[in-house]
Image (cartoon, helix red, strand yellow):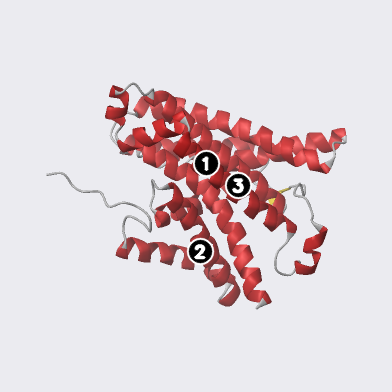
Amino acid sequence: MDYFLELFFGGLTRGSIYALIALGYTMVYGIIELINFAHGEIYMIGAFTGLIVAGVLTHLGFPEGSMLVIALTCAVIWSAAYGFTIEKIAYKPLRGAQRLSPLISAIGMSIFLQNYVMLAQTSDFLPFPELLPRFAFLDRFSGVLGSSELVIIAMTALVCVGLSLFIKYTKIGKAMRATAQNRKMAMLVGINVDMVISATFVIGSSLAAVGGVLIASHIGQINYFIGFIAGIKAFTAAVLGGIGSIPGAMLGGLILGWTEAFATGYVSSDYEDVFAFCLLVLILIFRPSGLMGKEKTQKV
């Protein structure tokens, strides 16, 4: 039973990170129907920002508790700035173009950011300091649930609840929902669609940065390529849950995390990715719109 619980919480931790990244994919797709392949690199940049800030704070002698808060804040601001800039440079000029053009632009931006970080930092793995707090009361459960896993799960839950409330009750959240339903109609009723799209990129990038710093502190190392793998997995989670659906992205991330954890634990770690993508294929065959996606009706 302990082994099952260990895999359960390990999958929940992994799925929480996938959910944080998948939210960025699904929000952008829901607003402008673009698959932002550079989103995984924003997650990577958030982790590197956290590493640099933590290194400076360690040199200055800051206490561990404040380092996590400051590193997370800086990573969120820096990644949000990247998300905002990418939208203005790579996607906005192509908003009226065919759908393939912004898709190619997204792939190009992803490759550019990978190489930029590799040249600016290093191609090697770098150690990441342990920023997450350690709880003594969890020592007796250390074989099942660690302190860093509890922090990641709790923070992801808080972020998801906060995002849901933001989307449902705030003025900008309502504008985002209106734009997602019908962009032209939203413009006709006076919604600043450009501002809504920019806000969507900023929020999605901020969530990815939170995930990047948390998982880097949990694993203890990063490199310039972590965004590609995590981005592909998170995109899979978004499609699995129903791309364009915020609850679907959360659910898809958790299902993907549990699938990988139990496949690794009971079968073999060699088939971790195989099980994840087989699950995606099955979902797409029997429910193409994803678990919580809505079927689109074709107009004649």
Residue occupied by mark 3: 158
Residue occupied by mark 2: 273
- Dot 3 or dot 1: first in sequence order is 3
Residue occupied by mark 1: 163
**Residue in the foreground of this view, choosing between 69 and 90:** 69
- Dot 2 or dot 3: first in sequence order is 3
Residue 114 visible: no
Q: CA distance from mark 2 to mark 3?
A: 28 Å
Question: Which of label 2 and label 3 is nearer to you?
Answer: 3
Seen from this angle, which residue lies furthest front? 169
- The x and y percentages for residue 153 are 63, 54
Residue 67 as seen in the image, left or right of residue 248: right
Residue 207 visible: yes
**Label 1: how many Cα within 10 Å (few below 14, some 14–19, many 20+):** some
Give the image quarter of residue 65: top right
Helix, strand or loop status at disc 1 = helix
Give the image quarter of residue 194: top left
Q: Is residue 29 above or below residue 14?
A: above
Residue drawn at (45%, 34%) of the image = 173
Q: Are marks 2 and 3 in contact (CB under 8 Å)?
A: no
- The x and y percentages for residue 227 are 56, 46
Q: Are marks 3 and 1 in contact (CB under 8 Å)?
A: no
Question: Which of label 1 and label 2 is nearer to you?
Answer: 1
Q: Is residue 262 above or below residue 164?
A: below
Quadrant location, the C terminus = top left
Residue drawn at (32%, 39%) of the image = 100
Residue 33 as seen in the image, left or right of residue 85: left
